[in-house]
Image (cartoon, helix red, strand yellow):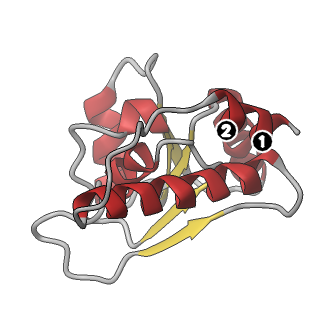
């Protein structure tokens, strides 16, 4: 499974895979025959499943997957976790390897740092720490864009 929040990025990945002769299926919010696409992946007819983060975050049980690649991080780690969880379902018998592609000195690296800060905040609240807003602040956005 390969996830991205950007459908154009997924489209470019699909073009590269097809050019290399690697069968793949694609799912985003505009996919018409969702059931057929899912079945092609589940049966192994297409070993790569390209999925938009929003379209694939809910309602899929893909225990046939043993690799999950996140092409770009999303500021909300829960959305990524839901996507990865498509492979971590009851019935999964294999280890699932999860890869996050993050280049140095990019906005993606800053998003990962933001996710880490949010995880610390959440852990502090859940461990009885003081409550603070978990929303994005102006300073968070400035840090992403600087």
Residue appearing at x 32%, y 29% in the figure: 34
**Badge 2 vs badge 1, beta-carbon distance below 8 Å:** yes
Q: How many dots with numbers?
A: 2
From the top left corner, tell me how far across and down residue 36 is, in percent. 30, 34
Residue for badge 1: 143
Q: Residue furthest front?
A: 130
The foreground one among 129 and 66 is 129
In the displayed structure, does residue 30 sit left or right of residue 123?
A: right
- The correct choice, above or below, for 121 with respect to 12 in the image is below
Residue 121: image location, x then y, percent: 42, 56
Residue that label 2 marks: 140
Q: Nearer the viewer, residue 50 or 139?
A: 139
Circle number at residue 84: none
Q: Between marks 2 and 1, how big is the CA–CA gap?
A: 5 Å
What is the crowding at mark 2: few (fewer than 14 residues within 10 Å), some, or many (at least 20)? few
Relative to 43, say whether 78 is above or below: above
Disc 2 element: helix
The residue shown at (56%, 43%) is: 74
Q: Is residue 27 above or below residue 131?
A: above
Q: Position of residue 130 (x, y in %)?
A: 32, 53
Tell me the quarter of the image containing the C terminus.
top right
Residue 96 placement: quadrant = bottom left
Under tag 1, what secondary structure?
A: helix
- Label 1 Cα crowd, 10 Å radius (few <14 / some 14-19 / many 20+): some
Q: Nearer the viewer, residue 12 or 130?
A: 130
């Amino acid at each position: 499974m390969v996830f991205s929040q950007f459908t154009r990025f997924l489209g470019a990945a699909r073009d590269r895979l097809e050019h290399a002769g690697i069968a793949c299926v694609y799912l985003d919010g505009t996919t018409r025959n969702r059931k057929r696409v899912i079945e092609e992946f589940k049966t192994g007819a297409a070993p790569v499943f390209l999925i938009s983060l929003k379209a694939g975050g809910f309602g899929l049980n893909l225990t046939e997957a043993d690799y999950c690649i996140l092409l770009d991080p999303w500021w909300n780690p829960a959305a990524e976790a839901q996507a990865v969880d498509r492979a971590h379902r009851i019935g999964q018998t294999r280890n699932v390897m999860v890869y996050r592609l993050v280049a140095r000195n990019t906005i993606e690296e800053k998003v990962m740092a933001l996710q880490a800060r949010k995880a610390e905040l959440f852990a502090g609240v859940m461990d009885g720490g003081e409550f603070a807003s978990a929303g994005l602040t102006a300073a968070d956005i400035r840090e992403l864009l600087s």
